[in-house]
């Protein structure tokens, strides 16, 4: 990540000509896309692809202006702790839903799934409270459309398991590792100052948002609230017991007769 040699205020970052221009282009494309939805214009897919590309450019530009100083380290720590707490709460609630289903005597193909999203409302503590920023947040968080497919299941792969298996462990939900490291240093801090962030215990969900999804770090630092979806999926058939499914022979080409 390219780092500038002096710190800028957050307001200065978002008012740089490059950031203003690219956000304006994203919002103009979105307005065009809304009109296409209403008219059924076929250019909607093209608009979506363009917005996705511009979001990636925006993210890279903003991240290049980020400096991990003491103030930003504290903000990132606070975000990480809020995210960690919500992930564990989502896991607990998902487990409780599955336990309720078990207690009711259900069995079969049953899945419980918990998804955690960054709060739909724009963070009130973010230093930039412009209309442009609030509209960009709606673009980012999927309020209008899914411009970031990797965010469809939330801040990380959703917490999902079936009735016959164990729920993922707390450590796995946080760090994708069932066992904590011996010295407790699980830390997803790639592309940050590794030495300065060595004690931060950043969770995988932060890494996923920062590295693989279209949010910049300046979008994340002030998020403290989340939206959660917990779903139950129950699949069953009406075939009698002992029924054998007839699977076609896919190796034979017998459908041209």
Image (spheres, rainbow, N blue to C red):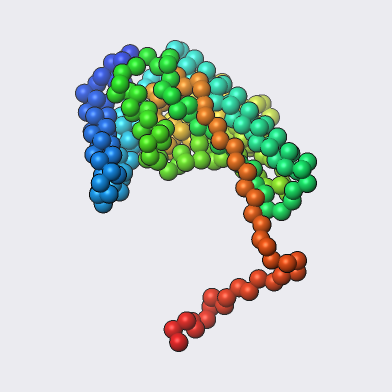
- The image shows residue 200, relative to residue 48, as above or below, that is above
Q: Position of residue 58 (x, y in %)?
A: 31, 32
Q: Is residue 237 left or right of residue 145?
A: right
Q: Residue at x 71, y 70 (%)?
A: 243
Residue 101 in sight: yes
Q: Position of residue 112 (x, y in %)?
A: 64, 43
Q: Looking at this view, is 56 or 125 the one in front?
A: 125
Q: Where is residue 32 in the image (x, y as percent from the top left)?
A: 23, 39
- The image shows residue 232, relative to residue 249, as above or below, that is above
Q: Residue at x 25, y 35 (%)?
A: 31
Q: Looking at this view, is 164 or 34 the one in front?
A: 34
Number of numbered discs overlaid on the protein picture: 0
Q: Which residue is drawn at 56% across and 35% down?
A: 229
Q: Is residue 128 left or right of residue 187?
A: left
Q: Where is residue 233 in the image (x, y as percent from the top left)?
A: 62, 47
Q: Which residue is drawn at 30% across and 48% down?
A: 45
Q: Is residue 46 left or right of residue 152?
A: left
Looking at the rendered image, the quarter that the C terminus falls into is bottom left
Q: Farthest residue toward the bottom?
A: 257
Looking at the rendered image, the quarter that the N terminus falls into is top left
Residue 3 in sight: no
Q: Looking at this view, is 132 or 198 the one in front?
A: 132
């Amino acid at each position: 990540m390219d780092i500038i040699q002096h710190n800028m205020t957050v307001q200065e970052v978002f008012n740089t000509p490059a950031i203003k221009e690219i956000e304006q282009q994203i919002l103009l494309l979105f307005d065009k896309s809304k009109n296409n939805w209403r008219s059924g214009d076929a250019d909607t897919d093209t608009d979506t692809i363009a917005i996705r590309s511009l979001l990636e450019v925006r993210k890279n530009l903003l991240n290049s202006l980020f400096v991990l100083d003491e103030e930003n380290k504290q903000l990132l720590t606070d975000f990480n702790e809020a995210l960690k707490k919500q992930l564990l709460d989502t896991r607990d609630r998902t487990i409780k839903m599955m336990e309720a289903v078990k207690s009711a005597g259900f069995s079969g193909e049953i899945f419980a799934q918990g998804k955690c999203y960054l709060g739909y409302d724009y963070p009130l503590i973010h230093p930039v409270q412009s209309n442009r920023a609030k509209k960009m947040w709606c673009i980012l968080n999927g309020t209008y459309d899914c411009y970031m497919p990797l965010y469809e299941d939330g801040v990380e792969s959703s917490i999902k398991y079936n009735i016959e298996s164990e729920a993922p462990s707390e450590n796995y939900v946080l760090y994708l590792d069932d066992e904590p490291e011996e010295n407790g240093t699980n830390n997803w801090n790639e592309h940050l100052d590794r030495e300065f962030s060595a004690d931060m215990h950043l969770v995988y969900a932060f890494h996923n948002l920062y590295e693989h999804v279209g949010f910049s770090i300046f979008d994340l630092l002030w998020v403290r609230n989340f939206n959660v979806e917990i779903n139950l999926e129950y699949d069953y058939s009406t075939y009698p017991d002992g029924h054998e499914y007839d699977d076609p022979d896919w190796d034979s080409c017998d459908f041209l007769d």
